[in-house]
Amino acid sequence: MRRPWAEQERGAGETGEPRLSPQVDEAEAGRPGGRRREFFSRGLFIRLALTALVLTVLGGLAYLTVSADGFIRRAELAREKSKLEAENAALRDENQLLRRKIERLLNDPGFVEDEARRKLGLIRPGETVYRLSEEPDLTE
């Protein structure tokens, strides 16, 4: 007699008893109308799916954080960019001042004379130079 809750394999054995499928709950197999045991219960499947999802998200976040194009590298590049932009602005301002100075040296004889006096210590004929020390001597 063949039972509806069990599967019979060919060549089941010498007794002719049907072999139970691994999916049949053996505690239920002896009762008519026994239920098949699922390989994954619904709750276990949901927990495994959620665990896989969480691990995937965490792995993705870890990759985005420490990879060559990750958040940390992008933050470092942003800091370096702002530093270079500030340095570039300072150099642009310095260039503008130097251009103005060149223009004055080419067109203003008074400026040339002032620069020669200041940098080279030149004086006009008949002028007397008095040099004062910057720190007064208070020991006397």
Image (cartoon, rainbow, N blue to C red):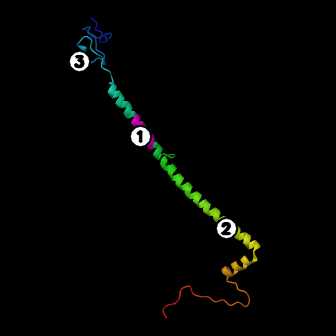
What secondary structure is the stretch in magenta mostly built from?
helix
Helix, strand or loop under label 2? helix
Residue at the spot x=70%, y=70% of the render?
101
Q: Quadrant of residue 31?
A: top left
Tell me: 123 left or right of 139: right
The picture places residue 53, in percent across and down from the top left corner, at 41, 34
For marks 2 and 1, the one nearer the N-term is: 1
Do the CB atoms of the residues marked 1 and 3 lie less than 8 Å apart?
no
Task: Give the CA distance from mark 1 to mark 3.
Answer: 41 Å
Please determine whether, in this image, residue 17 is positioned above or below residue 27: above
Q: Quadrant of residue 10?
A: top left
Circle 2 or circle 1, nearest the eye: 2
The picture places residue 85, in percent across and down from the top left corner, at 59, 57
The answer to which of 112 and 31 lies nearer the viewer is 112
Q: Quadrant of residue 7?
A: top left
Disc 1 residue type (three-letter): Leu
Where is the N terminus found, in terms of image quarters? top left
Residue at which label 2 appears: 97
Q: Residues within 10 Å of mark 2 (few under 14, many from 20)?
A: few
Please determine whether, in this image, residue 75 is positioned above or below residue 109: above
Disc 3 residue type (three-letter): Ala
Question: Magenta residues, as a range?
Answer: 53-62
Tell me: 28 left or right of 51: left
Picture disc at residue 108: none
Task: Give the CA distance from mark 3 to mark 2.
Answer: 94 Å
Circle 1 or circle 3, nearest the eye: 1
Residue at which label 1 appears: 58
The answer to which of 110 and 115 lies nearer the viewer is 110
Circle 3 or circle 2, nearest the eye: 2
Residue at which label 3 appears: 27
